Amino acid sequence: MLAVTWNFDILPDFIFNGLQAGAIYATVALALVLIFKATTLINFAQGELAMLGAFFVYVINIEQGLWLWLSILLAMGFSALLGMAIERTLTRPFDPSDHLPVVLITLGLFLIVNAVAADIWSFQTKRAADAFGKFPGWVPFGWGGERFIEVFGTRLRYQTIGIWVTLALVLFGMGLILNRTKIGLSFRAVSSNVESARLVGVNTGRTLGFGWALASMLGTLGAALVAPSLGGYNPNMMAAILIYALAGAALGGLDSLGGAVLGGVCVGLIQSVVVSWLGVVVLEQAYMSILQLAAAFLVILIVLMFRPSGLFGTRTIERV
Amino acid sequence: MASTPLLVVEKGSKQHKLWQSVGVVYVVALVLLVPVVLEPFEISKMNRALTLSVAILAVNLVVGFNGMLALGHSAFMGLGAFVTASLIQDENMDYWYIIPIILIVGFVFGVILGLPALRVKGLYLALTTIAMAVVFPSLVNIEQLGIAKRTGGPNGKVVSETVDAPSYMEWLPGVDGARGDRAYRYWMIVVVVALTMLVIRNYIRSRPGRAVIAIRDHEAGAAVYGVNLPMYKTVNFAISASLGALAGLLWSMDKSFVAGQDFTFLLAIDLIIGLVIGGVGTLQGSLVGGLFVVWVRDLTKRISIPLGFYDLSGEGPLANAIFGLILILFTFFAPGGIVSLGRLVQSKLIRVIPLRPDGEPIQPLADLDPGPESTRAQVAMNLAIIGAVLLPLGWLAMNIDNLIVGVFAFALRFQILITMPIALIVGINELQAHKEGKRSDSMVGQANVARILGGIGTVFLVLFGFFHFVDQYATGFDLPIV
């Protein structure tokens, strides 16, 4: 039988890993859900566009030498423009209720962006500057200048804290934009019912462009933040992350922003805690990365069987 | 009238049968010529294209005919390939016994995976099936249950017993000498593909097939009509899964080596691209799609377009970008795929009038006759002349050593397959109509030119094809024909 030696000592380590990965998945899931809410389409190319944004950061930060956060903001701006351009040219001509053509367009984009990035920057991983390498000097308790703090008997990396703080700020900012601004109001109108919004006078084209721009910015931010832990910038960096983010978005409900965040974090925790910790503890195998994906999707499948629209998604009722 | 096509025939009439038999002759000629004309490595590519055609047909069953976005059939291919390899290598079974086993295994897995997956709708189903495709390569490496030992783990599994041509089969075209084995496998695959298409064609035209299509067109309506939704959806998915597994068997037979990395999500994307570019919801589209994915991919790898400051070269990663671009262009301009483009061209050339139950056409042919001012003869003559001119142009252009020019030269030469027979048939028709008094006299000359040129062209084409085939076929036998 399986030798069960419950080892709770390393559990906090895996929990923190899961939380960090989960925050990244949450960011990308947010981007996916934003586009889904506005257009009822899944953007399969979201990961590749985010990767492109990360490479923008590389070019601005490493090749041109600007400050990292300034580079990230500039790259987010470029991604926003690119996202709006894509929305305008590629997705607007299609009827959103017919899923197949737009799935194909995003798949084609997936191939193109990946290939172009590989052609320009090659498949060699480029070193990434860490946004959250060390605590800044002014942090008290002797934590200044350290990479991590000791808590619960394990190390909590500054990276994890930094990513979470960024995610919280992003969520706060998005809440403000969506609830307090005019364009946010149009976005909520368009995601509720496109036809009615158009009838009331909302400029749906501009709103969709805004949605895509916001999604692209989120994707770029996520990719830029995850790059250090992946070893650097690489054209294939976002492929796996996209899958997990899709799983998280589906888990939380494709049209729920809060669900996206929760789903992303859950997927991160499942991936880390259930598979890695249980794998180490129960089956005593070193690292069962091969089963992480399968476990994540198994959970999604089970959830979807009982709640076909995800945990927080709106239940669709088909009118005949 | 400009809107009538060049030919109007009654369904089932002699002319209609003539038209259809020309198509059949072309297909048969193509099938016969491939193993003798192509190089051995190209025959392997053809085998792979036909294997993918079976897989694309499987995807078509679910996406095209049932309207479900199930995008992960690379997993079923992998399943079939690994089970085949394992059975041959470890259990020493024969390929013929494995075919029914593979079909059953695929069906069972299709039912297991289909039952939960079909409960989710639309895009969620797409996500779930993509997940299947993504997870599969990792599943091959699991060490529990002895799976990794049977699948060869990360290194893949070599099937040491290859399919060789038995000596009594060497009369088949191409099965001789160096490329003999690959050509033999080609013929085996052709037989399987033909049988599969026949079976699926009958399935689609039968009652369960109609139920499946009804589900695609309007699910609620089909349910109201009494169609058992879960059963038909699941059974359809299971049939599609067993077809996918069959494609895996063909893959394993052709390549004699299976590895998990061959069956990734990228293969699933290839299947989808082939499906769409071939034509969603059409049977011929699956065939075209498979051929497209293999051959055009190969073309994109060899393209090199100098664009001034930047050399657009297909070597390296950009081949994928060109492929993606083609996909996007097709989605914009030809969402029905190549088959829809072909049908568009065909609608300009011929219209088939169906018959009423009592045998009369539903629209009398005389109604569609364009009358004395018909331009058909002129069009036919133009076609014949253009065809005759483009052929030597294409021949000359073949000497230019550029890939894009080469593709155009290929098209220029092969257009006579279409233009010449049409000119001939239309010319004959118009002369017949003139004899019946329906046409003015001015077009007699044009019709004659069309008929004679078209006739010469068609005869030339038949003789050329025949002698080319005999020449290549005979070289393997050392016959006195040189």
Image (cartoon, rainbow, N blue to C red):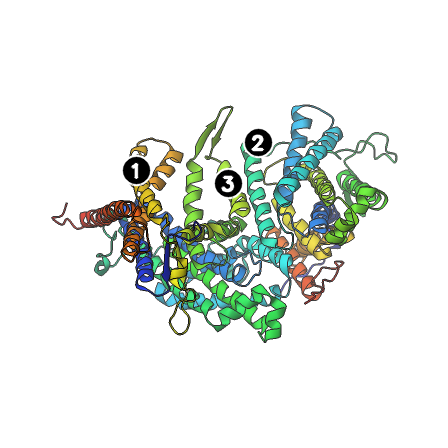
Labels 1 and 3: the sequence-earlier one:
3
Residue at 63% x, 59% y: name it.
B122
Q: Nearer the viewer, mark 1 or mark 3?
A: 1
Q: Position of residue A178 (x, y in %)?
A: 81, 45
**Disc 3 is attached to a residue of which chain?**
B
Q: Of the residues shown, which amino acid type is indicated by label 1?
A: Val
Of residues A225 and B304, which is closer to you in this image?
A: B304
The answer to whether one can see residue A130 in this image is no
Q: Nearer the viewer, mark 2 or mark 1?
A: 1
- Left or right for A252, reference B362: right
Number of numbered tags placed on the structure image: 3
Residue at 39% x, 52% y: name it.
B349
The quadrant where residue B218 appears: bottom right
Q: Residue furthest right?
A: A140
**Disc 1 is attached to a residue of which chain?**
B
Q: Position of residue A208 (x, y in %)?
A: 71, 44
Element carrying mark 1: helix
| Same chain letter for marks 1 and 3 | yes
Q: Which residue is mark 2?
A: A121
Label 1 vs label 3: CA separation?
36 Å
- Left or right for A155, reference B192: right
Element carrying mark 2: helix
Q: Of the residues shown, which amino acid type is indicated by label 2?
A: Trp
Q: Which dot marks residue B389? A: 1
Element carrying mark 3: helix
Q: Nearer the viewer, mark 2 or mark 3?
A: 3
- Classify B108 as above or below A208: below
Q: Which residue is mark 3?
A: B320
Q: Position of residue B166 (x, y in %)?
A: 25, 59
Q: Position of residue B131 (x, y in %)?
A: 60, 55
Residue at 33% x, 30% y: name it.
B400
Q: Residue furthest bottom?
A: B226
